[in-house]
Amino acid sequence: MPLTARGEAIFERLPGAAPRESTGAIGCQIVRHEELCIGCGRCASACPSGATLKGDMFDPMQLYSAPPDSRRGAIGTALRAIARHQPSGSIAVPERVSAFRTIVFDASRCIGCGACARACPTGAAEALPVPAEEIGAGVSG
């Protein structure tokens, strides 16, 4: 895994340490599982870099197209049973409603801290170790 900023500072003080290029990440690769996301925004609240944001819209098609055994799929099944017709597009979510918002993830702003994964109640955000190839690419020698 890449070193944290503190780890980099310690590494630089070691005698004979080779110069290193920063990977920009702290140590995790964030993988999003959209079918598990309920749009609660806890990941966005926990994100220190602004890589995860709560959107103002919700796309009901996310419910209709989700696997039936997922949380969104269960809600989609219930929606099919009570809806008169399938929605035609995204809908604006009122400010007071905190769930079912589209979560916007910008991987280029992600620092890999894993805060979103720890905050997510459904496991829709997962923090995985950075692949070894990426770590090796960040080391110059």
Image: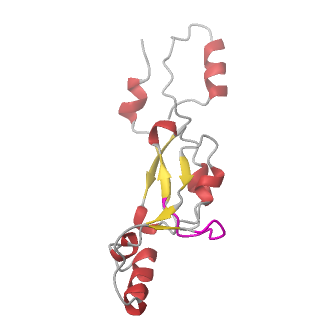
Q: Position of residue 128 (x, y in %)?
A: 47, 48
- Give the color scheme: rainbow, by chain, secondary structure or one colour: secondary structure
Quadrant of the rendered image containing residue 133: top left
User: Would residue 17 appear left or right of 77 to someone viewing this image?
Assistant: right
Quadrant of the rendered image containing residue 63: bottom left
23 in magenta: no
The segment highlighted magenta reads 94-102
Identify the residue at image location x=36%, y=71%. 61
Can you say whether 23 is above or below 119 in the image? above
**Furthest residue to the top?**
16
Identify the residue at image location x=48%, y=52%. 104
Can you say whether 21 is above or below 121 in the image? above
Q: Position of residue 23 (x, y in %)?
A: 48, 27
Quadrant of the rendered image containing residue 10: top right
Identify the residue at image location x=64%, y=43%. 48
Pick the residue in front: 4 or 61.
Answer: 61
Can you say whether 87 is above or below 9 in the image? below
Q: Position of residue 84 (x, y in %)?
A: 37, 90
For the C terminus, the image quarter is top left
Can you say whether 59 is above or below 45 in the image? below
Q: Main secondary structure of the magenta part?
A: loop
Q: Position of residue 75 (x, y in %)?
A: 45, 81
Pick the residue in front: 129 or 92.
Answer: 92
